[in-house]
Amino acid sequence: MPANVEMIRLFKAELQMCKVGPGEMLAVLCEDGIRADYANAFMQAANELGASPVQITLLSADSTAVERQTGKTGLGANPVAMEALKMADMVIDLVGLFFSREQNVITAAGARMLLVVEPFDVLKQMFPLEEQRRRVEFGAELIKNSRELRFTSEAGTDMRYGLSQYPVLTEYGYTETPKRWDHWPSGFLLTHGNDQDINGRVVLMPGDIVNEFRSYVQSPVELTVKAGRVVDIKGDGLDAAFLRSYIESYHDDRAYAVSHIGWGLNERAKWHHLYNTRNRDGEIGMNALAFYGNVLFSLGPNSELGGDNDTACHLDLPMRDCSLTLDGRSIVDRGRIVPEEMRAPGL
């Protein structure tokens, strides 16, 4: 499938943000027949920048395809492809290796990696900015120097996370650093609380998002957390029933674990985006995860930051109108970013 001129131009600009240039090997990983236009555009854009691109295509709909969010991929059974990816300076992941051992092996070998799977209009809407990187990295330093994160809401949320055991993951939409992974588009940061040092209550309210369901919460749901694990899910509406049923369907006790916590910093991401696109396939939902001032509460795995929980059940729950503090310092106040260094221009 031929790539259009606009797509090549945008992908070239993205690769320039990633400092791709002459003498570098760029590997484009894709599945047969899926995002072929993206693969072609990245190949042509890399050529125009003087890099040496190579395309590696997995068969789809069989045992070699990626099993998303299980930590297992068919790529691991293909040593030739793995060696080629490990030799690359940069890998464009059009498949979705996140939470996988293979992603960790490839980046550990030195390659920087960029996940690109959102629809083209979202890539344009949320094209990364250097200023966004600065704000995200400022937030990361705040977390690194803190020992307690607390987030609350007027609806009754009150959660405390002990910090220091896990690193911080920053996502600002491009990567120029060897061994570093990022996701285009994005614009947020996250970490994990210390094992068994996460306690409190989360109250999901109408307008909060269950990203895996591609839906907005319609009725209050109360989650009780003890020692890093959800021990009770209450609510009279369908939302609580759906959450209970979804988690139970995995038959995995680790699915009740509290996963990452962070906040959104992308003012160009739209909270309402999901309402207009909820029936569209092939969208992870980066508008929901990154919209400015959200507190991103999550359940499930912690393997992306070095933990040993690789459950396949992952629930991202971006919440509105919450407040978040680090060692008592106000970071988010009812959905408003407080530190001037992290505020978007004009906000």
Image: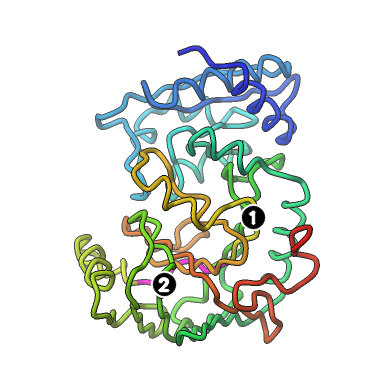
- Identify the magenta region: 257-262
Residue at the extreme top: 2
Q: Position of residue 283 (x, y in %)?
A: 43, 42
Q: Amino acid at mark 2?
A: Val
Residue at screen point 70% across, 23% down: 24
Task: Give the quarter of the image for residue 145.
Answer: bottom right
Q: Which residue is mark 2?
A: 258
Q: Is residue 258 magenta?
A: yes
Residue at screen point 41% across, 83% down: 227
Which secondary structure is most common in the magenta stretch? strand
Q: Residue 4's mark? A: none
Q: Quadrant of the N terminus?
A: top left
Q: Position of residue 330 (x, y in %)?
A: 69, 81
Q: Nearer the viewer, mark 2 or mark 1?
A: 1
Q: Quadrant of the C terminus?
A: bottom right
Badge count:
2
Q: Dot 2: within a 10 Å radius of its alpha carbon, few (fewer than 14), some, or many (20 or more) residues? A: many
Q: Position of residue 30 (x, y in %)?
A: 44, 27
Task: Give the quarter of the image for residue 35.
Answer: top left
Q: Which residue is mark 1?
A: 266
Colour basis: rainbow
Q: Dot 2 lies on which element?
A: strand
Task: Name the side, left or right, on which 98 lies relative to 235.
Answer: right
